[in-house]
Amino acid sequence: MCEDCSVTKPAAAAPAGCGSFGKTARLRRPAEFKKVFDSRRRAADDVLLVFGLANGLEHSRLGLSVSRKVGNSVVRHRWKRLIREAFRKHRANFPIPLDLVVLPQKGAAPPNARAVEESLRRLAKRLLRPQVANLRSQIAVR
């Protein structure tokens, strides 16, 4: 059961606004990561680098790439936990479903929950601008 939304479904079938992070909410295959990286749509600030692509599904998905250059195992896993938590909190606010690949910036300060959340929210919004405009123009043509 999800403690955030009182849903008794398995985590993989949890709704988008739910606090879980099941398999359907992740990018898992190398081809899925490659598709997002190849789209060349990215936004960055001093905390995160985010690659994004509209996915055509009913929900957004997250992929993480945290290199050993970021720090030791403890630091890398802290980055991953904070990024996943920020994604869980904000994915319901995306107007269109996205595939996001998130990387911590090289030389970023040690991870801070508030900074990671704010950065992901701001960067996802920046990535969405051209994609939402593109979708609106496609709808207007029909």
Image: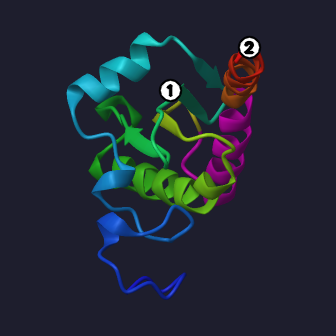
Image quarter where the N terminus lies is bottom left
Q: Is residue 68 left or right of residue 126?
A: left
How packed mark 1 is, by other alpha carbons closer than 10 Å (few <14, some 14-19, many 20 or more), is: some
Q: Is residue 118 left or right of residue 22?
A: right
Kindly identify the residue that appears in the image at 49 percent across and 48 percent down: 58
The magenta-colored residue range is 109-126
> SS at mark 1?
loop
> SS at mark 2?
helix
Front residue of 113 and 108: 113
Residue 50: quarter of image: top right
Seen from this angle, which residue lies furthest front?
Answer: 142
Question: Is 136 one of the magenta-colored residues?
Answer: no
How packed mark 2 is, by other alpha carbons closer than 10 Å (few <14, some 14-19, many 20 or more), is: few
The percent position of residue 27, horizontal first and vertical second, equals 33, 40
The percent position of residue 90, horizontal first and vertical second, equals 64, 56
Image quarter where the C terminus lies is top right
Upstream in the sequence, badge 2 or badge 1? 1
Q: Is residue 18 left or right of residue 117?
A: left
Front residue of 3 and 141: 141
- Amino acid bearing label 2: Val
Kindly identify the residue that appears in the image at 51 percent across and 11 percent down: 40
Looking at the magenta stretch, what is its main secondary structure?
helix
Q: Which mark is residue 141?
A: 2
Residue denoted by label 1: 106
- Amino acid bearing label 1: Lys
Say if 14 sits above or below 32 in the image.
below
The percent position of residue 64, horizontal first and vertical second, equals 38, 40
Q: Which mark is residue 54?
A: none
Q: Is residue 98 left or right of residue 134?
A: left
Say if 132 sits above or below 21 in the image.
above
Q: Is residue 34 visible?
A: yes
